[in-house]
Amino acid sequence: DARVTQTPRHKVTEMGQEVTMRCQPILGHNTVFWYRQTMMQGLELLAYFRNRAPLDDSGMPKDRFSAEMPDATLATLKIQPSEPRDSAVYFCASGSRPLTDTQYFGPGTRLTVL
Amino acid sequence: RKEVEQDPGPFNVPEGATVAFNCTYSNSASQSFFWYRQDCRKEPKLLMSVYSSGNEDGRFTAQLNRASQYISLLIRDSKLSDSATYLCVVKGGGNKLTFGTGTQLKVEL
């Protein structure tokens, strides 16, 4: 049963610290998405990769957030420096375009910035 | 105006009831439509795609009205296990999915 995996599942950190979240997409999937979910805003797309190339990161605050795919099995989302307003659940999802628009979500990283 | 709008609920219904959710979208050029389900503290999962002709999957029926730009989800014979948040999702240009903030359903005994 292929799944998207994310680490860590929970992270508590202090304001100003660097946070790195990792995602392993489903093997063979060529698209990776990073989302942030809060009660107020719902699910917001932060960044989107296809075949490891960043296609859209317009939803991401560029001054502190960065997203990369060093290889096909790993996507990272980094926040430096972190702020309390970054507290949210961060989901990674993968898909297989153009075969399907379906996205498969990982379990998420629950981030709390104190 | 938000790109995708949903009534947040909660919808509290007794087991066995029929319940319907609507969702409106603002971009008339939107190409694909979906309903995702999200259980408490879990990730969203695809429930069903929504086709112009409407589609049914067991107790679930989804319909699309392009002229009025809304999507609906009907759940018949609700079960306790249907309790979740239902996310309306619209695909626009650039392969991006835009999620509504969700409608919460609580099915009670």
Image: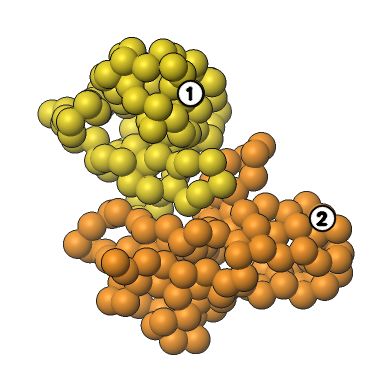
Chain colours: A orange, B yellow
| Circles 1 and 2 on the same subunit | no
Q: Can you say which quadrant of the picture contains the C terminus of chain A?
A: bottom right
Give coordinates of residue B58: x percent, y percent.
18, 31
State which mark lies toward you, 1 or 2: 1
Rendered image: mark on residue B106: 1
Q: Is A38 placed left or right of A48 in the picture?
A: right
**What residue is drawn where x is 33% and y is 21%?**
B78
The residue closer to the viewer here, A66 or A93, is: A93
Give coordinates of residue A29: x percent, y percent.
31, 72
Q: Is B4 placed left or right of B92 in the picture?
A: right
Above or below A79: residue B47: above
Q: Say what secondary structure mark 2 lies in.
A: helix
Q: Is residue B57 visible?
A: yes
Residues at discs 1 and 2 in contact (Cβ within 8 Å):
no
**What residue is drawn where x is 86% and y is 64%?**
A15
Above or below B45: residue A16: below
Circle 2 sits on which residue?
A84
Report how far apart the C-alphas of labels 1 and 2 lie in the structure.
31 Å
Q: Can you say which quadrant of the picture contains the N terminus of chain A?
A: bottom left
Chain ID of residue with mark 2: A
Give amino acid for label 1: Lys
**What residue is drawn where x is 33% and y is 63%?**
A95
Above or below A31: residue A42: above
Give amino acid for label 2: Pro
The residue closer to the viewer here, B80 or A106, is: B80
User: In this figure, what is the number of numbered marks?
Assistant: 2
